[in-house]
Image: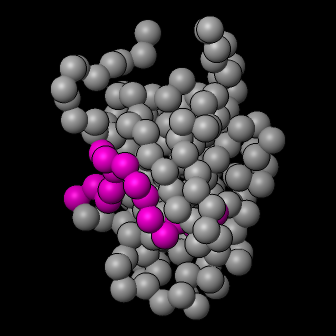
């Protein structure tokens, strides 16, 4: 049984909790809503253009994305710095097969301890399975998401 929020509780994106709903506004002017991604494994990755570990992990995450997109993996790289250079963002975005977000709308998410990269991984049931600051390698990201992608999609109950 999935965890639930207490009545009146403020949603917070914490390990083991139900993921609070959000929308990501991408640089391509698309809006992606968590509520439209039910049954998928969703990754929110906060990064910054000046962050070396961020720029190193995004291609590793992209490699996993290219291998797993048909299995229901969604990744959104959400820009965390407020003074970003459009050209620097575009150079990174052009190399990725997943969207770069300019803004996340929703409560409970953000960088952890003001550190980038920070990632949140939400399983097919909508539960946060990873909420941590620190960068991924291809191997560590694969080890985290592949078992989640192997889980069956939840059956919708009418």
Give the image quarter of residue 105. Answer: bottom left
At 49% across and 42% down in the image, what residue appears? 121
Q: Residue 80, percent across and down? A: 38, 70
Who is closer to the viewer here, 125 or 25? 25
In the rendered image, the quadrant that contains the N terminus is: top left
Q: Residue 42 lies in magenta, yes or no? A: no
Does residue 60 appear anywhere in the picture? no
| Main SS class of the magenta portion in the image | loop
At 77% across and 54% down in the image, what residue appears? 66
Q: Residue 81, percent across and down? A: 37, 76
At 53% across and 75% down in the image, what residue appears? 55
| Total number of numbered discs in the rendering | 0
Q: Specify whether 65 is left or right of 48.
A: right
Bounds of the magenta segment: 99-113
In the rendered image, the quadrant that contains the C terminus is: top right
Q: Residue 152, percent across and down? A: 69, 19
Q: Residue 63, percent across and down? A: 72, 59
Does residue 29 appear anywhere in the picture? yes
């Amino acid at each position: 049984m999935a965890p639930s929020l207490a009545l009146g509780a403020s949603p917070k994106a914490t390990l083991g909790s139900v993921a609070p709903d959000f929308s990501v506004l991408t640089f391509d002017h698309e809006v992606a809503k968590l509520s439209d991604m039910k049954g998928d494994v969703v990754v929110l990755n906060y990064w910054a253009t000046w962050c070396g570990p961020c720029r190193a992990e995004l291609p590793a995450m992209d490699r996993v994305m290219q291998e797993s997109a048909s299995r229901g993996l969604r990744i959104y790289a959400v820009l965390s710095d407020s003074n970003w250079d459009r050209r620097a963002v575009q150079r990174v975005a052009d190399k990725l097969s997943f969207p770069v977000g300019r803004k996340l709308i929703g409560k409970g998410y953000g960088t952890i301890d003001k550190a980038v990269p920070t990632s949140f991984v939400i399983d097919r049931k909508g539960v946060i399975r990873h909420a941590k600051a620190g960068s991924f390698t291809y191997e560590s990201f694969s080890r985290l998401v592949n078992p989640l992608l192997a889980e069956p999609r939840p059956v919708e109950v009418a």
